[in-house]
Image: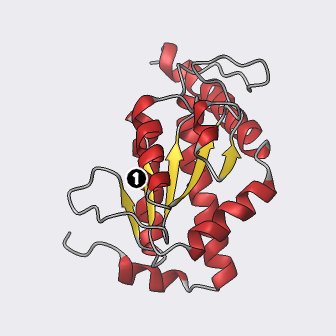
Amino acid sequence: MKGFYSEGYKDTECLILKEMDTALSAVDPEAVERLVHEILNADQVFFVGVGRVLLSLQAICKRLAHLGIKTHYVGEITEPAITEKDLLIVGSGSGSTMFPLGIARIAKSRGAKIAHIGSNPNSPMKEYADLMVRIPVRTKEYLEDEIDSAQPMTSLFEQSLLLFGDIIAKMIIEERQIDMKSLWRCHANLE
C-alpha cells in the first residue's frame, strides 16, 4: 500500500542530504584547522548550546571523549571549573541566544578560549569568540547570505553541526593514527 509518506520518502531524503552537503561544503577549512588545533591543545573542552543544538553538541562531546579528549557540556552534574587552559565551544546558529552568550561571557572572564560554531559572523557572540567556524545556513535571523533550507526552523544547522563534529573526530583519528578498535576502551561499558 503506497501512501504519501512512502511516495515522498526518497525525494525528501535526497533534498535533506543535498542541503547538508551544500552547508558542510561551505565551511572554511582554515577555520576548521584553527578549531581542531584549539581542541587538541586545550586541557578540557566544554560545550554549550540549547535545544536541538545542545543535543548535537552532546554527541560531539561524547565522540571526542572516545578519542581521549577531556570533554564536558555546561550543566552536567559533574562539570568541573573552567580555567584559562580550557576551550569553550559555543553552538548557536544566530549567535544571539541568551544562555550561550552568558556562558561565553563568564568563560571569557575566567580566561578560557571561546570558539563559536554558528551562522551569523556579526552576532553578539563576536565580542567573546576567539575564533568562529561558520556553517552559513538559515537561522532565525534570515540573513541574506545564509543557505536556505526547505526544512523546518534550524534543522539544517543542527544536522550540519552533528556531522561537522563527526568529520573533525574522523580527521583527528586519521592524524593521530588511532586504531578504530582502541576507541572502545573509552566507550561506556556499563551497558
Decide if residue 48 is on the left or right side of residue 37. left
Rendered image quadrant of residue 78: bottom left
The answer to whether 174 is drawn above or below residue 133 in the figure is below
Where's residue 137, x and y in %? 68, 30
The answer to whether 14 is drawn above or below residue 42 in the figure is above
Q: Which quadrant, please, contains the C terminus?
A: bottom left
**Which residue carries the number 1 mark?**
58
The amino acid sitting under disc 1 is Gln
Badge 1 density bin: few <14, some 14–19, many ≥20, Cα 10 Å: many
**Is residue 2 something one can see in this rendering?**
no
Where's residue 52, x and y in %? 42, 36
- Which residue lies most toward the front here? 109
Where's residue 174, x and y in %? 67, 78
Decide if residue 32 is on the left or right side of residue 178. right
Decide if residue 165 is on the left or right side of residue 107. right
Q: Residue at x 40, y 63 (%)?
A: 62
**Is residue 138 something one can see in this rendering?**
yes
